[in-house]
């Protein structure tokens, strides 16, 4: 998910938030209308309920899409950090092994030099 799709996703979620606020306003409006002492106005309640139901459907659709999109999102899918670090560790191990071989080579050369010196003295 690139930054543009993240921005549009955030915008869609902000729109959902605004719709939820509107849904609550509609529900409150219907409750106020039901408590009206002169009785509820049927047309107003029908309009509020219709808008309420449409907004609920829109919210559900958008949230399903966002959840599906989030489940498909793999932020580390193309990340090369782990292989890069593994390669660096392998290089350090090889450098260590090479240094050990160099030490062994010096030690062997030291033994050979000592053996040659010992043979020259005899």
Image (spheres, helix red, strand yellow):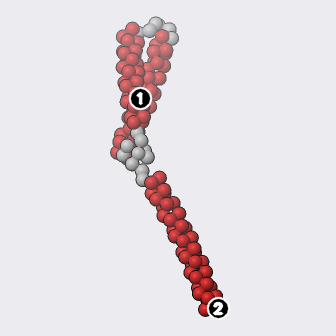
Residue drawn at x 42%, y 50% as measured from the top left: 79
- Residue closer to the observer: 30 or 59: 59
Residue 110 visible (yes or no): no
Which residue is tagged 1? 63
Q: Place residue 20 in its image quadrant.
A: top left
Q: Image point 61% across, 88% down: which residue?
A: 119
Which comes before the other along the chain, label 2 or label 1?
1
Name above or below for residue 116 compared with residue 43: below
Q: Residue at x 40, y 15 (%)?
A: 49
Point out the residue furthest to the bottom here: 121
Q: Secondary structure at mark 1?
A: helix
Image disc number at residue 122: 2
- On the question of residue 62 being in view, the answer is yes
- When the figure is inspected, residue 71 is found, relative to residue 51, above or below; the finding is below
Q: Categorize mark 1 by other alpha carbons within 10 Å: few (<14), some (14-19), many (20+).
A: some
- All told, the count of numbered labels is 2
Residue 50, percent across and down?
Answer: 36, 15
Q: Look at the picture and state if 27 lies above or below 6.
A: above
| Quarter of the image where the N terminus is located | top left
Residue 17 disc label: none
Displayed quadrant of residue 73: top left
Q: CA distance from mark 2 to mark 1?
A: 93 Å
State if disc 1 and disc 2 touch (CB < 8 Å). Answer: no
Q: Mark 2 against mark 1, which lies toward the viewer?
A: 2
Query: Please, what secondary structure does the residue beneath circle 2 have?
Result: loop
Residue 37, how many percent across, how many down? 50, 8
Disc 2 crowd, CA 10 A, few/some/many (<14, 14-19, 20+)? few
């Amino acid at each position: 998910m690139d930054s543009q799709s993240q921005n549009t996703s955030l915008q869609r979620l902000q729109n959902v938030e605004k719709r939820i606020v509107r849904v609550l306003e509609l529900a409150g409006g219907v409750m106020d209308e039901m408590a009206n002492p002169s009785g509820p106005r049927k047309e107003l309640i029908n309009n509020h309920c219709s808008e309420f139901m449409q907004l609920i459907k829109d919210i559900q659709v958008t949230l399903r899409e966002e959840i599906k999109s989030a489940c498909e999102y793999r932020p580390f899918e193309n990340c090369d950090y782990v292989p890069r670090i593994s390669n660096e560790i392998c290089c350090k191990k090889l450098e260590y092994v090479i240094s050990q071989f160099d030490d062994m080579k010096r030690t062997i050369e030291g033994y050979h030099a000592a053996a040659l010196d010992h043979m020259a003295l005899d």
